[in-house]
Image: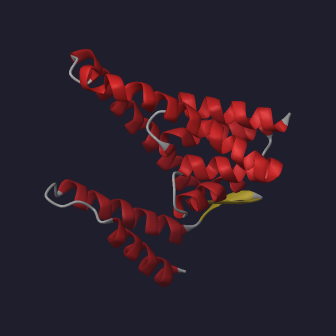
């Protein structure tokens, strides 16, 4: 029964999540909390680990959750469920891509999806930032060092974003984060 539940839940997640893993994080979070597979703190930790390991966050999350609930076969079933919709859709669209991409309505739909995803990803970033900055030990407290690092990274990223000639190097952001972490913690 758990295998069928894992497969169907992750199949729905893979089918109805647009914009990649960051757009799927709220959907995965709702599913995990609804089924009681982990609490919010464990979910935030799982997302952090999924981001730092190779591969898609959705695939890593499905594999982790499936393994934690039903072992190796659970991981296989959950991962298959989350990947299957994308695989089938890509196979179908490859043949139609050249014709579809030229249509004005398709272009407008893609622009609309991009705008919606920007909102979903921003909301996910704000949620994850809040879980890093707020410490819940009986009563909510702020971790000012984490808030300081977050503010520095936002300002640093905004400065590069506004300077449109350069892109933000992920390696540079990781290096700045590591230095700030060593200095503050």
Q: Residue 113 sits in which quadrant?
A: top left
State the scheme by which the image is colored: secondary structure
The N terminus, quarter of image: top right
Q: Is residue 7 above or below residue 136?
A: above
Q: Is residue 72 above or below residue 19?
A: below
Please report the residue visible at 60 percent of the width from the left and 36 percent of the height from the top. 27
Please report the residue visible at 28 percent of the width from the left and 62 percent of the height from the top. 168
Query: Could you tell me if residue 159 is visible in this image?
Result: yes
Where residue 173 sits: x, y (%)? Answer: 36, 68
Q: Residue 80 sits in which quadrant?
A: top right
Please report the residue visible at 49 percent of the width from the left and 83 percent of the height from the top. 182
Query: Could you tell me if residue 39 is visible in this image?
Result: no
The C terminus, quarter of image: bottom right
Q: Which is more toward the observer, 177 or 1?
A: 1
Q: Is residue 114 above or below residue 106?
A: below
Furthest toward the front, the residue is: 95
117 to the left or right of 167? right
Furthest toward the bottom, the residue is: 183
Q: Which is more toward the observer, 49 or 91?
A: 91
Please report the residue visible at 71 percent of the width from the left and 41 percent of the height from the top. 77
Where residue 4 sits: x, y (%)? Answer: 78, 32
38 to the left or right of 22? right
103 to the left or right of 30? left
Where residue 49 sits: x, y (%)? Answer: 60, 62
Where residue 124 sits: x, y (%)? Answer: 51, 45
Q: Which is more toward the observer, 145 or 86?
A: 86
């Amino acid at each position: 029964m758990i295998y069928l539940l894992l497969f169907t839940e992750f199949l729905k997640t893979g089918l109805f999540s647009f914009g990649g893993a960051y757009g799927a994080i709220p959907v995965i979070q709702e599913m995990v909390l609804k089924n009681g597979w982990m609490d919010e703190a464990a979910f935030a930790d799982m997302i952090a680990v999924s981001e730092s390991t190779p591969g898609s966050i959705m695939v890593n999350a499905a594999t982790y959750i499936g393994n934690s609930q039903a072992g190796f076969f659970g991981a296989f079933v959950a991962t298959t469920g989350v990947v299957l919709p994308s695989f089938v859709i890509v196979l179908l669209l490859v043949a139609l891509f050249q014709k579809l991409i030229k249509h004005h309505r398709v272009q407008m739909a893609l622009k609309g999806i991009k705008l919606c995803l920007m909102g979903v990803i921003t909301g996910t970033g704000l949620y994850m930032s809040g879980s890093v900055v707020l410490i819940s030990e009986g009563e909510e407290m702020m971790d000012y060092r984490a808030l300081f690092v977050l503010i520095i990274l936002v300002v640093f990223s905004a400065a590069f974003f506004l300077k449109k000639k350069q892109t933000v190097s992920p390696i540079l952001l990781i290096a700045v984060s590591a230095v700030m972490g060593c200095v503050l913690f």
